[in-house]
Image (cartoon, rainbow, N blue to C red):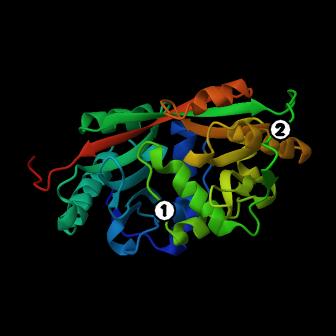
Amino acid sequence: MKKKLLWRPATTQDFPEIVRLCNEANQVDNPARVMSEDDVRKLTATSEMAANTQLALDDRGSIIAFATVLEPARTPLAFEVEAAGFVAPNWRGFGLGSALLEWQETRARELFTACENELEVPRWITTMGASTAHATVDLLTQNGFEKKRTWLEMVRDLSKPIPEAQLPANVRAVTPDGYSEETWAAYNDAFRDHWGSRADTWEEWTAREARDDYRPGLSVVALGKNSDDALEVGGLVITRVNSDQFAAHGGSFAYIHLMGVRRSWRGRGIASSLLLHALQAFSAAGLEMAELTVDADSLTGAVSVYKNLGFYEARRHATYAKELSLKTNE
């Protein structure tokens, strides 16, 4: 590379510029994805931003590349470090992506080394790649990453008829307002058998609720009595709306960020009924589409549920993972 670059960690003051960079990259790699500062905040949700983020700046001080890793977290499959990286389109072909990936792997090994009590499980570094991000996918596979899971991004046209929702007689559909802790508990129970999922901490859950695009009024939970006659949330649909994303998606839409039903509540039509309640609320709010992301191989049969309610596949992306040895030559 002819021009000398400045490399340094990111700070919160960089977030607006990082958003700009990420969305420039997404225009090439994943045009339907429009990121916000909340998204960047999630990517950098680390206690050591100085150690776990990396920026490249050109000679004018503009951010042209960004990468991050998060502290290792235990999932049912492995001990994982989540990573993300973006390179400006006009700076590709100069080795920036390879340099960031090498830094991420090195930093992930350092983080794993500090967690000796977890060394008996596989150690993965994971990242996401859209099916349209051909250069990113090529870089990952050339460096030993494997596709582990495919995710379908599905859309439902709200101008099509929406059937009436029919919850069991002893179950009510309400917004999650006033039921944050109960909804958090329901989420963690519902996602126990989802691929690669781990329980949210209370801090992580409240961070979801603090996002600018969270819409509690367009979210819905199933409220009823459990086997101990205690009131609990048995299922949830958590919704986000970001008008900055409408143009890239061809119209206004609500994004179903989370959809789940407790194990003990399944088999009662809760999922379909909650979705129908949500779709009716979206339509009443004047939105044109509903969108969601689902595991293509979901064990709960979620893909069929969504198809039966009129959702169709629009895009897809995948989780890529590489198992790391703590020795750099392996």
Which sits in the foreground, 132 or 289? 289
What x and y, as percent, mark residue 304?
62, 26
- Label 2 packing within 10 angstroms: few (<14), some (14-19), many (20+): some
Which sits in the foreground, 119 or 61? 119
Q: Residue at x 66, y 52 (%)?
A: 234
- Label 1 packing within 10 angstroms: few (<14), some (14-19), many (20+): some
Amino acid marked by disc 1:
Ser
Mark 1 residue element: loop
Q: Earlier in the sequence, mark 1 or mark 2?
A: 1
What x and y, as percent, mark residue 273?
76, 39
- Nearer to us of marks 1 and 2 is 2
Which sits in the foreground, 150 or 102? 150
Report if residue 93 is visible in the image: no
Q: Residue at x 70, y 41 (%)?
A: 270
Q: Is 53 rendered above or below residue 307? A: below
What x and y, as percent, mark residue 198?
43, 55
Q: Is 188 left, or right, of 175 in this rendering? A: left
> In 3D space, how far apart are the residues under numbered discs 1 and 2 (Cα atoms)?
51 Å
Residue designated by label 2? 165
Mark 2 residue element: loop
What x and y, as percent, mark residue 30?
55, 38
Residue 117, by quadrant, is bottom left
Residue designated by label 1? 62
Amino acid marked by disc 2:
Ala
